[in-house]
Image: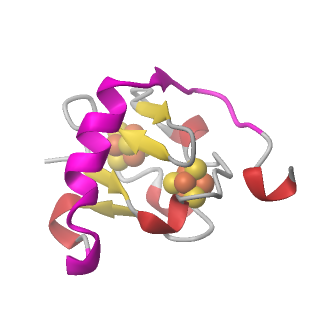
Amino acid sequence: MTHVVAQPCVGCRYTDCVVVCPVECFYEGEKMLYIHPEECIDCEACVPECPVEAIFHEDNLPDEWKEYVQINADGAENSEVITEKKTPLADN
Ligand code: SF4
Ligand code: SF4
């Protein structure tokens, strides 16, 4: 099991989530972040940190966003790890 970053993260990237992750399993895509499904330990620390409620346990992911399970898995494989907060896209 893993946590998944879903559609509300697209275009936002406040990145409040990455600083609390104890295993540094967030990866930075061009428009959103991804969680690596094999690295996430389901600690849930990131969930309340996200201002737009984009992070869900895989089991609680709304049906409309089920495709984000694969999007996170693929995205994490092809992106660089992110461990520090960055300026939000919305402020750029
Ligand atoms: S805090 Fe939420 S919206 Fe911002 S980067 Fe993290 S998951 Fe995406
Ligand atoms: S649930 Fe925990 S381990 Fe998984 S991404 Fe969030 S903070 Fe990291």
Image point (44%, 66%), residue name? 7
Segment tinted magenta in the rendering:
62-86
Image point (48%, 23%), residue name? 81
Quarter holding residue 58:
bottom left
Residue 66 counted in the magenta span = yes
Residue 57 counted in the magenta span = no
Image point (29%, 48%), residue name? 71
> In the picture shown, does residue 22 fall above or below 3?
above
> In the picture shown, does residue 30 fall above or below 3?
above
> In the picture shown, does residue 68 fall above or below 36?
below
Between 84 and 13, the one nearer to me in the picture: 13
Q: Position of residue 23 (x, y in %)?
A: 39, 27
How many numbered circles are shown? 0
Q: Position of residue 3 (x, y in %)?
A: 29, 51
Asked whether residue 41 appears in the rendered view, the answer is no
Image point (58%, 26%), residue name? 83
Is 13 left, or right, of 90 in this rendering?
A: left
Asked whether residue 38 appears in the rendered view, the answer is yes
Is 80 left, or right, of 75 in this rendering?
A: right
Is 82 left, or right, of 64 in this rendering?
A: right
Q: Residue furthest top?
A: 80
Q: Position of residue 46 (x, y in %)?
A: 47, 51
